[in-house]
């Protein structure tokens, strides 16, 4: 039981990171029905921004986190304006190929400037270097920090979406862009804000994963990004609570497979879950089947 609880805590920590990345996927899809595969590389850039702030500027975790979120939000808006906005009325396959192209562009531009070497975050000192011991269960302060920040960011996101004017605009555009525009809502600004919000969360996830695993590289976003996409699909793509639940579920499944089975199979199990969900319930855990008028 103690081993199970230890693995469960590890899974919650990992799931918190997946949840933050999955939220970006699900928000963008909910607004413009686009799977933004460049999102996983914004997560990677967020990790590098945190590394730069902490290593070269000597900043602490929280200032580095905020700077990473702000810069990633700006980058997300730039990508939307340059790469996606001109193709908004194009076919889905065209936009999907563009998203993959943007993803590769971000990866190899980062590799050009930062090289392919693995970089290590500076060692964590002080309270965050400590851990809590309950018998054989060890909970590090880094894990508590990651889970706490993730929950705070998700709560803030829900408040923005449910309680603010821009949040109401996001929900209106998600339901019907044309009707929202007739009601005086700026669709372009709403879409840009959605990209900014999702990219900020990805930037935060990048810093948290750098702190947790202590190593980053230019291709670090590929597999976690795909797993976060699986989490979004599992919970119901386009639904914020679904992405949150899916992130924690995938994180715990991955850790339990590695802990009780073979770590080589953890990725295979996650993608097998994606296949099963698409076959059994394509709309995801919280999604509802909707008829399409023709």
Image (tube, helix red, strand yellow):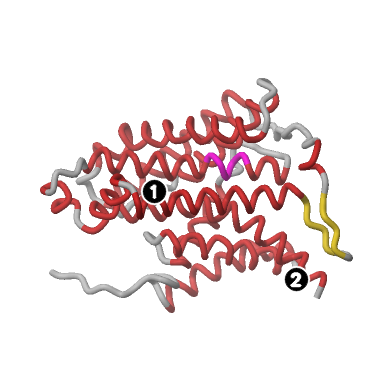
Q: Is residue 180 left or right of residue 131?
A: left
Above/below status of 77 relative to 24: above
Which residue occupies the foreground of this view, 115 or 199? Answer: 199
- The residue mark sitting in front, 2 or 1, is 1
Which residue occupies the foreground of this view, 204 or 106? Answer: 204
Residue 282 highlighted magenta (yes or no): no
Q: Secondary structure at mark 1?
A: helix
Q: How many numbered marks have been drawn onto this rendered protein structure?
A: 2
Q: Quadrant of the C terminus?
A: bottom left
x, y percentage for residue 275?
A: 49, 70
Name the residue: 57% across, 25% down.
Answer: 112
Task: Determine whether label 2 and label 1 are within 8 Å by CB.
Answer: no
x, y percentage for residue 152?
A: 55, 50
x, y percentage for residue 2?
A: 82, 71
| Magenta-colored segment: predominant secondary structure | helix
Q: Which residues are magenta?
A: 203-207
Name the residue: 63% across, 43% down.
Answer: 208
Residue situated furthest bottom in the rendering: 280
x, y percentage for residue 66?
A: 55, 34
Q: Which mark is residue 160?
A: 1
Q: Quadrant of the N terminus?
A: bottom right
Which residue occupies the foreground of this view, 95 or 200? Answer: 200
Q: Quadrant of residue 267?
A: bottom right
Q: Which mark is residue 261?
A: 2
Q: Is residue 152 left or right of residue 291?
A: right
Q: Quadrant of residue 218?
A: top right
- Whichever of callouts 2 and 1 sits on the residue coming sooner in the sequence is 1
Above/below status of 125 relative to 115: below
Above/below status of 183 relative to 121: below
Q: CA distance from mark 2 to mark 1?
A: 41 Å
Residue situated furthest right in the rendering: 135
Name the residue: 63% across, 26% down.
Answer: 53
């Amino acid at each position: 039981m103690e081993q199970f609880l230890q693995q469960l805590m590890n899974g919650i920590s990992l799931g918190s990171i997946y949840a933050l990345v999955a939220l970006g996927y699900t928000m963008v899809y909910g607004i413009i029905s686009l799977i933004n595969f460049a999102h996983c590389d914004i997560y990677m850039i967020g990790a590098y921004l945190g590394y730069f702030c902490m290593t070269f500027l000597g900043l602490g975790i929280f200032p580095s986190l905020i700077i990473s979120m702000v810069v990633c939000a700006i980058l997300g808006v730039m990508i939307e304006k340059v790469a996606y906005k001109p193709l908004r009325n194009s076919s889905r396959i065209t936009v999907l190929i563009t998203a993959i192209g943007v993803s590769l562009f971000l990866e190899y531009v980062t590799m050009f400037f930062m090289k392919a070497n693995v970089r290590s975050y500076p060692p964590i000192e002080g309270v965050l270097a400590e851990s809590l011991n309950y018998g054989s269960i060890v909970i590090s302060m880094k894990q508590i920090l990651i889970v706490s920040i993730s929950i705070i960011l998700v709560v803030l996101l829900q408040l923005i979406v449910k309680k603010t004017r821009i949040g109401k605009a996001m929900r209106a555009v998600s339901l019907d862009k044309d009707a929202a525009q007739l009601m005086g809502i700026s669709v372009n600004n709403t879409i840009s804000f959605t990209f900014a919000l999702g990219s900020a969360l990805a930037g935060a996830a990048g810093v948290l994963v750098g702190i947790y695993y202590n190593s980053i590289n230019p291709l670090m976003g590929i597999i976690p990004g795909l797993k976060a996409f699986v989490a979004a699909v599992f919970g119901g793509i386009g639904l914020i609570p679904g992405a949150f639940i899916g992130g924690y579920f995938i994180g715990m499944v991955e850790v339990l497979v590695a802990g009780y089975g073979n770590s080589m199979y953890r990725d295979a199990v996650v993608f097998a879950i994606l296949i099963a969900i698409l076959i059994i319930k394509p709309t995801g855990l919280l999604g509802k089947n909707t008829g399409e008028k023709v």
